[in-house]
């Protein structure tokens, strides 16, 4: 995250504790830069995470995600 | 820089939510409610409406709207959200009111409220989340369940011949003249989602500009109820549900409406306006100086429907009103216009009346035997009980009560009309209680009786009842 901010490129981030692993963000991401963790979070879901590169900051994952606080997208 | 993040339309932490995970919603993975919530919260924040918004939650999965939305919140009884929203909007015209409902709540239990709020063109937003199933209660058939769709109550699929067809609310409401904007959108792929966002924003804007009623139906997935994974559920929604629930704008008159175009007078409910109306009503009875009332009267009048029981109550109330007293009149009657039982409660008081109900009257009028049997025991000790002896065979307890036995119907018949027995009784009541002077009551009757040709007969009947009691003493 800090790296992306420093690089001045768009990025998305997932709050792994709030994510319920529905994978709708993966389904809408035009760049396929979101993946599902193999680890479980404390609510027993496999949360999504940003693979780390090529996010365009389009925000589609944010609107596809039903959880208010799970996804944050920043477009510098 | 553009950031997409949790809106200030939400509480930062959902403190009202029970259990752990105070930052996550209670919704299942992949549920469309969260998406719709986000769009509403975002619009409220961006339009600067948070501080004056009221979110009315339904019964259903979205019952906990007040956990999340950082604005005023109501939780309505099942199906009643548009009625509650109407009340909030009319009493607080500057508020932004959202009636948020699911398909079981809006299209089954609250069908009447839904249709009539739309038909009145209330200046509210109805956001209707349609997932074709009763989600919260475990996936039963809803009015919007599709033909062939399985649910716990249609295990072999919904049948047209047995369960009827899915109801298309947007199309139905679009037939009404009052609504300003009606659109159906879907939480499907990104294109649909962004279109849904646009519709929600438009509806809120229409309300903020005072342009009237908006209805946005949002076709949405219920992965748990549908027994599908969230991604598959959204595919199924796009492929199958939209065939039955086509997307589109069914009505949009937002360009031709303004805050004055749909006739709505909220000021009709202002206390000053109501007082003025009551004063006008009072003035039809003729000007009069206030007349003191020695003892408060709590009356019950009972008999058959058609005997003028309710009118008797109204006439006494009007006399009390003209005398400047606090009055209430509360009728109770069966479905029959004639021949059923009827009674009414009348309070005449020197101070404000708390309840219009009279459980223990100090004046009881009975004009049939069942009323004597039903109510005599409820009269307070020493209370007046007026019995029409032409009709009632029984007699009240003269030790505990003050009976006034008067053949009211026979007297009325002599006057010229048996139906006027209620006014004979009124005369007897005034004489027995001494509540108001005779002349004052007669003056009021002259003004209160609308049919001019019957005024003299009524005055005669009143006087006969009054004299009967005075002479009997």
Image: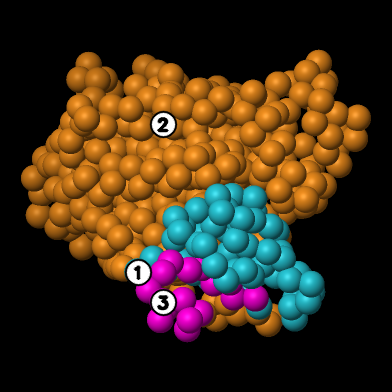
The region drawn magenta spans A1-16
Chain drawn cyan, letter?
A: A
Q: Which residue is mark 3?
A: A7
Specify which label sits upstream in the sequence, 1 or 3.
3
Q: Residue at x 28, y 27 (%)?
A: B253
Q: Quadrant of residue B132?
A: top right
Judged from the image, the secondary structure of the residue bearing numbered disc 1 is loop
- For the residues bearing labels 1 and 3, Cβ distance under 8 angstroms: no
**Compared to B450, does B212 lie above or below?**
below
What is the chain identity of the residue bearing mark 3?
A
Q: Which residue is mark 2?
A: B182
Sort mark 3 into few (<14), some (14-19) or many (20+) by Cα contacts within 10 Å. few
How far apart, in angstroms, are the residues tagged by discs 2 and 1? 37 Å
Q: Residue at x 21, y 52 (%)?
A: B270
Residue A2 sits inside the magenta stretch: yes
Q: Which residue is mark 1?
A: A76
Task: Give the camera-side residue of A3 and B101.
Answer: A3
């Amino acid at each position: 995250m800090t790296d992306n901010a420093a690089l001045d490129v768009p990025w998305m981030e997932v709050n792994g504790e709030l994510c319920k692993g529905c994978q709708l963000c993966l389904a809408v991401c035009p760049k396929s830069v979101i993946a599902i963790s193999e680890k479980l979070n404390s609510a027993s879901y496999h949360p999504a995470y940003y693979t780390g590169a090529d996010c365009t900051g389009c925000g589609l994952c944010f609107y596809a995600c039903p959880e208010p606080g799970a996804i944050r997208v920043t477009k510098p | 820089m553009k950031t997409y993040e949790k809106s200030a339309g939400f509480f930062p932490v959902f403190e009202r939510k029970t259990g752990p995970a105070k930052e996550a919603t209670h919704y299942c993975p992949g549920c469309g409610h969260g998406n719709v919530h986000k769009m509403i919260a975002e619009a409220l924040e961006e339009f600067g409406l948070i501080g004056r918004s009221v979110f009315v939650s339904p019964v259903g999965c979205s019952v906990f709207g007040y956990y999340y939305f950082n604005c005023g919140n109501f939780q309505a009884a099942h199906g009643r959200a548009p009625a509650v929203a109407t009340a909030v909007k009319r009493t607080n015209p500057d508020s932004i009111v959202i009636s948020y409902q699911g398909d079981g709540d809006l299209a089954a239990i609250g069908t009447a409220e839904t249709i009539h709020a739309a038909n009145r063109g209330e200046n509210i937003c109805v956001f209707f989340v349609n997932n074709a199933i009763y989600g919260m209660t475990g996936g039963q058939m809803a009015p919007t369940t599709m033909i062939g769709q399985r649910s716990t109550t249609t295990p072999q699929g919904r049948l047209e011949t047995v369960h009827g067809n899915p109801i298309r609310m947007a199309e139905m409401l679009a037939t009404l003249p009052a609504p300003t904007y009606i659109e159906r959108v879907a939480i499907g792929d990104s294109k649909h989602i962004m279109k849904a966002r646009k519709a929600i924003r438009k509806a809120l804007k229409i309300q903020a500009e005072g342009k009237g009623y908006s209805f946005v139906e949002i076709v949405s997935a219920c992965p748990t109820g549908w027994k599908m994974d969230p991604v598959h559920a959204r595919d199924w929604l796009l492929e199958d549900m939209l065939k039955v629930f086509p997307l589109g704008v069914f009505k949009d008159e937002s360009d031709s409406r303004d805050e004055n175009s749909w006739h709505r007078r909220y000021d009709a409910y202002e206390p000053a306006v109501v007082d003025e109306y009551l004063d006008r009503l009072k003035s039809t009875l003729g000007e009069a100086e206030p007349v003191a009332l020695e003892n408060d009267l709590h009356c019950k009048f009972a008999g058959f429907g058609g005997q003028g029981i309710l009118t008797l109550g109204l006439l006494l109330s009007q006399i009390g009103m003209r005398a400047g007293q606090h009055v209430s009149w509360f009728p109770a009657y069966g479905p029959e216009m004639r021949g059923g039982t009827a009674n009414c409660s009348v309070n005449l008081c020197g101070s404000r009346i708390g309840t219009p109900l009279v459980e223990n009257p100090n004046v009881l009028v009975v004009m049939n035997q069942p009323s004597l049997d039903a109510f005599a025991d409820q009269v307070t000790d020493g209370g007046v009980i007026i019995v029409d002896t032409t009709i009632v065979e029984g007699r009240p307890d003269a030790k505990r009560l003050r009976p006034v036995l008067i053949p009211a119907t026979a007297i009325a018949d002599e006057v010229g009309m048996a139906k006027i027995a209620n006014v004979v009784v009124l005369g007897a009541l005034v004489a027995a209680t001494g509540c108001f002077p005779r002349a004052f009551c007669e003056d009021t009757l002259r003004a209160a009786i609308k049919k001019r040709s019957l005024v003299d007969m009524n005055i005669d009947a009143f006087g006969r009842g009054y004299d009967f009691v005075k002479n009997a003493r």
